[in-house]
Amino acid sequence: MAVERDFLIDGYNLLHAAGMAQQRYARGDLDRARGRLLAWLVARLTSEERQRCTVVYDAHLDPPPPDVPRIWRQDDILIRFTNPGQDADTLIEQLIEDHPAARRLLVVSGDLRLKTAIRRKGGHPISSERFVTELEERRNNPPTTTPVPTRPRPEGIDWAEEFGDVSVADLAAEIEAEESGIDSDPWSRYVAELEQQLKDGSFE
């Protein structure tokens, strides 16, 4: 069985790569841009992928309203805003460090700091630009055959970028070879623990 992937996305980095950013933002514009990015992801990720996807935003750029938590789910995707005084890179590094099976993790960002952090943990970086290209290609060229091989042939290696970006389509096979002994769903348990902390009021 192919190993599932977890997506950890640098939200504003992907917003720029997807062409949804603006030079200047009037009141409410950034919130609407985040909504467009969420809709874009929902239209291109499978239902299972959305449940295993976390998008991180810097709160200091445009914090959520006071009645909105810093962590919540929308359309199955986990949205996280940083804590006061914390930037997105720092939070993403923390999430990489805390991830129960980092070799399953795909970090979407153009930031060299984050690419280094995830490779150090045995996971996989992909630039936001490459991620956009991969998802658009998937949307424009859906599979023509119903059967999906358990271990698909690695393809697209020729376009691997200098910092080790990987193909979303090929990642499962590579991870399966590395992670065959890992428990089936540690990320879901990790997210469930976060959500339980929110309910209990113990999250800081």
Image (cartoon, rainbow, N blue to C red):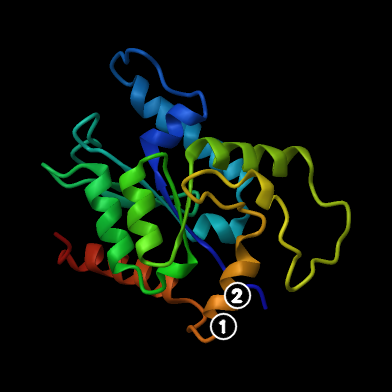
State the residue lying farthest toward the right.
145
> Whole-percent x and y of residue 117?
32, 56
Residue 100 position, x and y percent, is 36, 74
Q: Residue 18, image x and y in percent?
A: 52, 29
Furthest toward the left, the residue is: 85
**Residue situated in front as seen by the camera: 122 or 146:** 122
Residue 199, above or below 114: below
Question: On the image, numbered disc 2 is attached to which residue?
Answer: 176
Residue plotted at (27% across, 45% down): 89
Q: In the image, is 59 to the left or to the right of 19?
A: left
Q: Is residue 69 visible?
A: no
Res 98 seen here: yes
Quadrant that contains the N terminus: bottom right
Secondary structure at badge 1 equals: loop
Q: Quadrant of residue 120?
A: bottom left
| Quadrant containing the C terminus in the rendered view | bottom left
Mark drawn on residue 96: none
Q: Alpha-carbon neighbours of circle 1 within 10 Å: few (<14), some, or many (≥20)?
A: few
Q: Residue at x 20, y 68 (%)?
A: 200
Front one among 114 and 157? 157
Residue type at mark 1?
Ser
Q: Residue at x 48, y 76 (%)?
A: 185
Left or right: residue 126 compared with residue 144: left
Work out whether 122 lies above or below 32: below
Q: Residue at x 56, y 58 (%)?
A: 49
Horizontally, residue 155 falls left or right of residue 55, namely: right
Are discs 2 and 1 less than 8 Å apart at CB?
A: yes
CA separation, marks 2 and 1?
5 Å
Label annotation for residue 180: 1
- Total number of numbered discs in the rendering: 2
Q: Is residue 31 toward the left or the right of residue 7 in the image?
A: left
